[in-house]
Image (spheres, rainbow, N blue to C red):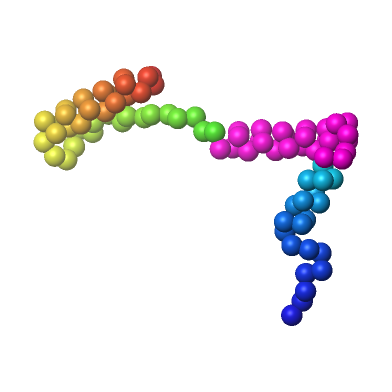
């Protein structure tokens, strides 16, 4: 069994916070810039554009025509309410 002589996670976090508090703004700038770049890259990966695609009704569709027309009307209404074009 090994003993964690470095302290627990709270102590490590506290030491990091104290170190961060003690350094000057000029010394912090590279870390802040790197964090902003990482955040920007993450945002670009996660923030996806929302596209809504409604295919046309196939010539050989399944089901009855009334169901298709009701479904298309509901989808059109939802699209109009969303503000997307």
Q: Nearer the viewer, residue 29 or 55?
A: 29
Q: Quick one: which residue is furthest to the bottom in this view?
A: 1
Q: Nearer the viewer, residue 66 or 28?
A: 28
Q: How many marks?
A: 0
Question: How far across and down, in percent of the image, does residue 77 sit?
Answer: 26, 23
Q: Nearer the viewer, residue 3 or 64?
A: 3
Q: What secondary structure prevails in the magenta region?
A: helix
**Quadrant of res 51:** top left
Q: Tell whether position 28 is magenta.
A: yes
In the displayed structure, does residue 54 sit left or right of residue 47? left
Residue drawn at x 49%, y 29% is 49
Residue 20 sits above or below residue 5 on the image: above
Question: How far across and down, in percent of the image, does residue 58 sit?
Answer: 23, 33
Residue drawn at x 31%, y 31% is 55
Report the magenta residues as a range: 21-46
Residue drawn at x 72%, y 33% is 36
Question: How far across and down, in percent of the image, does residue 30 sit?
Answer: 83, 35
In the displayed structure, does residue 46 sit left or right of residue 24? left
Quadrant in the picture for the C terminus:
top left
**Quadrant of res 56:** top left
Q: Nearer the viewer, residue 31 or 22?
A: 22
Quadrant in the picture for the N terminus:
bottom right
Residue drawn at x 72%, y 56% is 10
Question: How far across and down, in percent of the image, does residue 16 sit?
Answer: 80, 49
Q: Tell whether position 44 is magenta.
A: yes
């Amino acid at each position: 069994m090994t003993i964690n002589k470095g302290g627990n996670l709270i102590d490590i976090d506290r030491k990091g916070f104290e170190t961060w508090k003690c350094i000057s703004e000029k010394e912090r700038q590279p870390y802040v810039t790197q964090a902003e770049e990482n955040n920007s890259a993450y945002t670009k990966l996660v923030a996806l554009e929302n596209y809504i695609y409604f295919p046309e009704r196939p010539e050989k569709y399944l089901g009855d025509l009334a169901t298709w027309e009701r479904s298309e009307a509901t989808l059109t209404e939802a699209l109009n309410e969303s503000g997307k074009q």
